[in-house]
Amino acid sequence: MVFSWRKRKPRNGDKKVHNMELEIPRHFICPIALDLMKDPVTLSSGITYDRESIEKWPKDGNFTCPVTNQVLRSFDQIPNHSLRKMIQDWCVENRSHGIERIPTPRIPVSSAEVSEILFSITDSRRRLDRCGCLDSVHKIKKWGLESERNRRCVVANGTAGVIAAAFDAFAGDSFEKNAHAHLLEEMLYVMYWMFPLAQEAQIYLGSQASLRAWFGF
């Protein structure tokens, strides 16, 4: 396949960079997008796709591997680090032609990672461990800032209800009310991009303690 790559902008002192077409190795091409893969992932069928393309595939009602037509029980995506490194090396080798190196993608958060953090938040809530809870909330905040994909994963695993329960517990701790202020602010920040909240979360946030804390900020 021949792929027309955009020109690199010439720097001061550079000779003019001519537009040209380069042939990309076939195994670097996503079977769906027919474009150079930036984040190659492999399905259980053994076929590798660009993550962005294969994530859209099941959302359109498709339940088979696009190449093999094999019905897939799971669309779990395993990062193909070896292929991604080969693609990056190819980009570097062709940089004299204006090819830009594909950056190393961030690995999306998994449901298992979210569940582990939610367990930690629940445990911290029971012990009123402010520092432990704040650390876990900060991890969720970091994931959410990294990508929309991460935010969807966080929300899909029931995070709103767990954080709302923790918010209610710390808001009701009258002995350390002022000390918990920063934690409560951080939890509100995280829940902001989870709206509309699940019914379970709304119940916790509807308590007197939560409402006083909510309107106190």
Image (tube, grey):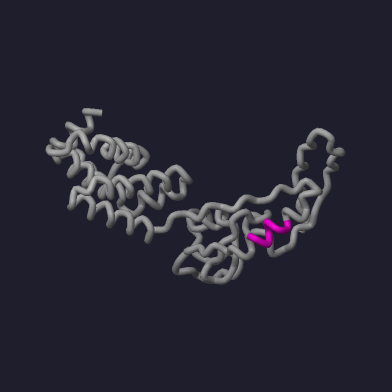
For the point 37% across and 61% down, the residue is 112
Place residue 91 in its image quadrant. Answer: bottom right
| Location of residue 121 in the rendering, given as x and y in whole percent from the top left corner | 27, 52
| Location of residue 11 in the rendering, given as x and y in whole percent from the top left corner | 78, 36
In-front residue for pair 33/182: 182
| Above or below for 142 versus 41 | above
| Location of residue 60 in the rendering, given as x and y in whole percent from the top left corner | 50, 54
In-front residue for pair 138/66: 138
Left or right side of 131 for 81: right
Left or right side of 180 for 208: left
On whether residue 87 falls in the magenta region, the answer is yes
Place residue 67 in its image quadrant. Answer: bottom right
Dominant SS type (magenta) = helix
Task: Give the mark count.
Answer: 0
Left or right side of 117 for 101: right
What range of the chain is rendered magenta?
Answer: 85-90
| Above or below for 55 versus 200 | below
Quarter of the image with the C terminus in it: top left
On whether residue 128 falls in the magenta region, the answer is no
Q: What is the residue that sits farthest to the top in this orientation?
A: 216
For the point 20% across and 33% down, the residue is 178
Quarter of the image with the N terminus in it: bottom right
For the point 80% across and 49% down, the residue is 96
| Location of residue 131 in the rendering, given as x and y in whole percent from the top left corner | 27, 46
